[in-house]
């Protein structure tokens, strides 16, 4: 996880057009989660970096958080809410989230990178509620907030969210808030084949457009994304804004002087014909031709103003093209990308920065060739409460969760453990009343073999001896089994496993008398057979072989 709690107030050319009397403070929180264990995403970190740079360019102080776990997300949202509240009533808040997002029971959840979700109830404990984010913004008490969720990407938790529906649920925006989604409610968004998602790329470009109201910015984004995805992805917004907001104000144009009143006796028919033929043109050369023929003509002052306006618009378009090019390569590690920028914009706004990046990349390359790779930073030690919970948080038995409560009755995760116990007991009641189903493709008879293949640090323990083996035949029902194995040395343990429909097996092994120290294992079946390892005492090897349906 990369947590960059750095606030930068930018006063760049992009915001120099804003009204001098405009004194609002702009504060943003940008989160990009992609390093998931089950289904990592390539672009959220890139999307967050691009959006952070874009927002800084239009005057926002930005807190940037990359690959945040649950604790980091809570801390970031809390810190952002306090900063926004201290910024004053006229402050503008902006929250951008890129990563997995799912709905459960009508509530939307943003998913931290450490979330472990197997069942529907896990979503409520492992996800970060979007309603909590909206409450934090409302608590800040500022006049205007914008929340952008480039989420709803391919859902890796389908088994746990079947009843919740695809994508995110519709949320009504609180007063003074605009909520923007990368796709419509219940739909899935694309992660993108390039460095950024289609939505983030379009939003970054639209924000830089001078004179566009915030609603027009998102209309522009919608058109761009629909065009990019052949209408497969349709961005959507929910707004309760009551005033106007511009990311970048329109630059002032030169106002033409009033045209002099022509003498009554002059015949201006030819001049009027000339002027009417060019007055709506955007070609400065035509107005220069008019001034060449009529330097003191009826419309000389207006022609001069038109020339200035056309040149200003041309310069603004050139600046936008310059900025868009640099934004596309700003995070590149290739000196060739920055050299290409310099060839197209040798005197561009970012020419000096491009040269500096080329020099820095060269130095990094030389240093990499001379220096050995640095040693990895030491892994921080978790506190006993968190360490114990990490061992049992995925438990499916009441006994394992009760073991945590016995040791930490007032622990940080006590409420979650109690809720999980209640959920398991409720599932047992439902299972007892419901007829069994044998429709799972992995149901049938299996041979389960367990062998200790590496000596334990407890050589005298009866269940940790090298060469200790056990073998049982079990019946898999509804894709699950739970057995107790007794080894040839009298040791053994409990093996519990769950099969996915695609053939992946996730299981837990608990040495006899050591259920609180259970260890997980996972394997991929091939032709009905799979093998996996799990460290419990020494190293255990598990082999599953399909015998019959």
Image (spheres, grey):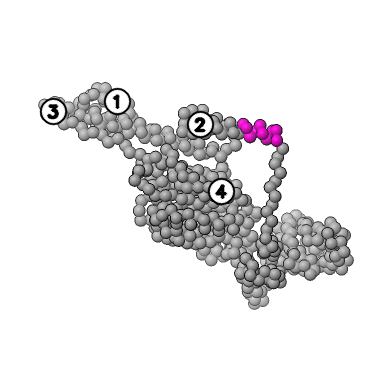
**Farthest residue in the left direction?**
265
Could you tell me what secondary structure mostly forms the magenta stretch?
A: helix
Instruction: Say which residue label 2 marks.
Output: 352
Out of 365 and 268, give the one closest to the viewer: 365
Q: Secondary structure at mark 1?
A: helix
Q: Nearer the viewer, mark 2 or mark 3?
A: 2
Labelled pair 3, 4 in contact (Cβ < 8 Å): no
Instruction: Say which residue label 4 marks.
Output: 4
Residue 450 visible to the viewer: yes
* Residues rendered magenta in the picture: 362-371
Instruction: Say which residue label 1 marks.
Output: 288
How many angstroms separate mark 1 from mark 2 (CA)? 35 Å
- Left or right relative to 82: residue 517: right
Q: Quadrant of residue 372?
A: top right
Q: Does the stretch in magenta take in 244?
A: no
- Left or right relative to 324: residue 73: right
Instruction: Say which residue label 3 marks.
Output: 263
How many angstroms separate mark 2 from mark 4 (CA)? 25 Å
- Left or right relative to 257: residue 509: right
Mark 2 closeness class: few <14, some 14–19, many ≥20 residues within 10 Å: few
**Farthest residue in the top direction?**
292
């Amino acid at each position: 996880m990369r947590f960059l709690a750095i606030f930068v107030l930018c006063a760049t050319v992009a915001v120099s057009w804003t009204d001098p009397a405009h004194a609002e403070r702009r504060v943003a929180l940008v989160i990009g989660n992609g390093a998931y264990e089950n289904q990592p995403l390539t672009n959220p970190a890139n999307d967050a970096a691009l959006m952070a740079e874009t927002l800084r360019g239009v005057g926002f102080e930005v807190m940037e958080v990359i690959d945040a776990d649950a604790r980091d997300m809570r801390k970031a949202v809390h810190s952002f809410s306090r900063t926004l509240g201290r910024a004053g009533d006229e402050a503008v808040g902006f929250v951008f989230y890129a990563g997995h997002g799912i709905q459960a029971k009508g509530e939307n959840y943003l998913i931290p990178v450490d979330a472990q979700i197997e069942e529907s109830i896990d979503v409520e404990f492992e996800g970060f509620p979007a309603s909590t984010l909206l409450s934090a913004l409302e608590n800040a008490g500022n006049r205007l907030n914008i929340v952008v969720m480039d989420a709803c990407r391919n859902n890796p938790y389908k088994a746990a969210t079947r009843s919740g529906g695809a994508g995110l649920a519709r949320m009504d925006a609180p007063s003074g808030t605009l909520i923007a989604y990368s796709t419509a409610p219940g739909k899935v968004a694309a992660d993108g084949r390039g460095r950024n998602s289609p939505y983030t790329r379009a939003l970054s470009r639209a924000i830089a457009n001078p004179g566009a109201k915030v609603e027009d910015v998102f209309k522009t984004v919608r058109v761009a994304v629909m065009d990019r995805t052949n209408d497969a992805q349709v961005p959507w917004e929910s707004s309760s804004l009551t005033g106007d907001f511009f990311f970048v104000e329109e630059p002032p144009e030169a106002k033409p002087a009033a045209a002099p009143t022509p003498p009554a006796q002059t015949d201006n028919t030819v001049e009027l014909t000339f002027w009417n033929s060019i007055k709506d043109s955007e070609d400065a050369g035509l107005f220069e031709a008019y001034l060449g023929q009529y330097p003191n003509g009826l419309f000389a002052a207006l022609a001069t103003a038109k020339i200035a306006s056309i040149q200003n618009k041309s310069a603004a378009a050139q600046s936008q093209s310059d900025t868009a090019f640099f934004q596309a390569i700003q995070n590149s590690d290739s000196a060739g990308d920055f050299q290409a920028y310099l060839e197209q914009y040798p005197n561009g706004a970012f020419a000096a920065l491009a040269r500096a990046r080329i020099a820095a990349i060269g130095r990094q390359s030389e240093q990499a060739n001379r220096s050995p790779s640095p040693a990895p930073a030491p892994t921080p030690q978790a506190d006993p409460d968190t360490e114990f919970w990490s061992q049992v948080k995925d438990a499916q038995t009441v006994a394992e969760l009760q073991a945590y409560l016995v040791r930490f009755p007032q622990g940080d995760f006590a409420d979650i453990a109690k809720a999980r116990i209640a959920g398991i007991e409720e599932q047992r009641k439902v299972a007892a009343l419901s007829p069994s189903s044998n429709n799972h493709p992995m149901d049938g008879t299996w041979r389960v073999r367990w062998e200790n293949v590496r000596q334990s640090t407890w050589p005298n323990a009866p269940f940790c001896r090298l060469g200790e083996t056990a073998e049982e035949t079990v019946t898999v029902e509804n894709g699950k089994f739970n057995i107790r194995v007794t080894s040839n040395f009298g040791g053994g343990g409990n093996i519990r496993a769950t099969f996915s429909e695609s053939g992946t097996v996730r299981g837990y092994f608990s040495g006899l008398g050591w259920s609180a120290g259970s260890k997980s294992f996972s394997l991929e079946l091939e032709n009905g057979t799979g093998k996996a390892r799990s460290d419990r005492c020494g190293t255990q090897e598990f082999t599953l072989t399909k015998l019959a349906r």
